[in-house]
Image (cartoon, rainbow, N blue to C red):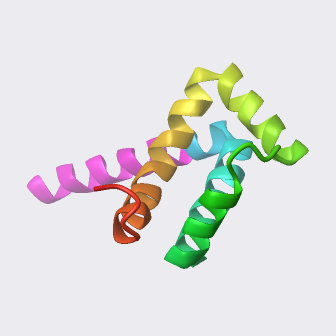
Amino acid sequence: MKKRSAILVAAGASLVAALAYAQFPIENMIADKVIQKYQTSTCEQLWQEKAQGQGKPKPEMEQRAIAALKGDPQMRQAFFNKVSAPIVNKMFECGMIP
């Protein structure tokens, strides 16, 4: 009986995750791109980008993505939930946060 309950809970969790993924396909594309950038960048590259990026205008596509996230709180929350851990872990590894 416990095994059946565990299977039902796992199936339900998978369904919820699939629905959340399908709800914001653009957000998922953006989040995947951001995560990939942090996973493939070296610490040196991130430090250089941070130093060069101050005051530099963002590309139009990035500006539109930011506007979409600002305009939709649910999408923004889904985005943050997905990218937070990979970004914070990389920043910690690189000494960018204490």
* Residue 62 x, y percent position in the rendering: 79, 45
Predominant SS along the magenta part: helix
Q: Is residue 82 left or right of residue 6?
A: right
Total numbered badges shown on the rendered structure: 0
- Image height of 72 relative to 16, above or below: above
Q: Nearer the viewer, residue 49 or 90?
A: 49
Image quadrant assignment for residue 3: bottom left
Give the percent coordinates (x, y) of residue 48: 62, 68
The image quadrant where one finds the C terminus is: bottom left
**Residue shown at 44%/49% (left/top)?**
84
Residue 3 lies within the magenta run: yes
Q: Residue at x 86, y 48 (%)?
A: 59
Q: Is residue 66 left or right of residue 15?
A: right
Closest to the observer: 97 or 88?
Answer: 97
Q: Residue furthest right?
A: 60
* Residue 76 x %, y %: 58, 32
Q: Position of residue 90 (x, y in %)?
A: 43, 66
Q: Please report the bounds of the magenta region as a residue range.
A: 1-18
